Image: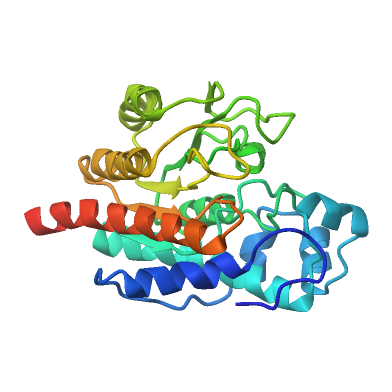
Amino acid sequence: MAPAPTRGSFRFDKYQLVMVALRESGHPITEHAPDPCPREWLEAVHCPDYVEQVFTAQVPYEKERRIGFPVTPHIAQRVAHTNGGTWLAAQLAMRHGYAANSAAGSHHALYDTGAGFCVFNDLAVCANRLIAQGDARRVLIVDCDVHQGDGTAALTAGREDVFTLSLHAEKNFPVRKARSSLDVALPDGTSDADYLDVLGTHLPRVLDDFAPDIVLYQAGVDPHENDKLGRLALTDEGLERRDRYVVETVRGRGLPIASALGGGYGIDPRVVAERHARSMIAMARENAAFTRAS
């Protein structure tokens, strides 16, 4: 945990509370501490000048406004480790079928700036590195955050070895959407049944047509009906069914899946943290069925 900046409205305390909720859940978990993401991996995706601004805590004010908080030295070290966490989750998923990063999912970060509470785009960085070092030939990024993964789409645009699938609220942030490989924009108030129907229509087809070697999953819980920044209406049960379905569909094809935390917002950070923890536990339980079968 990095000390929270003095400006900005983002609730950094939810991350520690997620770990508390996981530890108190009674579900067996194994914790891993990631190394910081090497700077050259970040510079392979982001503008080196911007990476320098982050690591020297010299991010211009206009970029900090887009991010939503000042980038302090503590925050710079934190985002290096959260990017390392998505990479570690991917490596563990290739060994165990599923693993989760209890942070990150920073899908709004762009080439030369952060945005929307995101500094570096761990999903794009991880996908690029997996391919660069030969761990995967093709990477599918499934983004079920309530907000479109515009940064991920922009950073991977034109690549034939990375496919981005985004299910998001049509009228939510960002106002100007990027173009994912496949965008599914949902109307306000979309409920469990309609959401799961759309997901079930598109995810199997994308998996079969694109044939990835690994899936990175942006598992935001902000499609929840009570989310402060959401516009959809999924219930607790709907979120669990979503997450179990994604893991079941991916693992059923013999593929590993690594999730990142993504968005989740509310007045009480404990409630949001418990929502994230339930999401990860649901995915782990679904993966366990495939682990036992093998």
Is residue 150 left or right of 292 when viewed as pictured? right
Can you see residue 113?
Answer: no
Asked if 240 appears above or below 19 in the picture, the reply is above
> Residue 207, percent across and down?
34, 32
Could you say which quadrant of the image residue 27 lies in? bottom left
Instruction: Quadrant for the C terminus, please.
Output: bottom left
Could you say which quadrant of the image residue 208 lies in? top left
Q: Residue at x 47, y 25 (%)?
A: 190
Could you say which quadrant of the image residue 58 lies in? bottom right
Can you see residue 250?
Answer: yes
| Outermost right residue | 61
> Residue 89, percent across and down?
41, 63
Number of marks drawn: 0
Asked if 217 appears above or below 292 in the picture, the reply is above
> Residue 10, percent across and down?
69, 59
- Image coloring type: rainbow
Between 45 and 278, which is closer to the camera in this rendering? Answer: 278
Q: Residue at x 65, y 62 (%)?
A: 11
Asked if 285 appears above or below 85 in the picture, the reply is above
Q: Residue at x 61, y 43 (%)?
A: 152
Q: Residue at x 32, y 45 (%)?
A: 240
Instruction: Quadrant for the N terminus, please.
Output: bottom right
Between 271 and 73, which is closer to the camera in this rendering? Answer: 271
Asked if 281 appears above or below 197 in the picture, the reply is below
> Residue 130, percent across and down?
46, 55
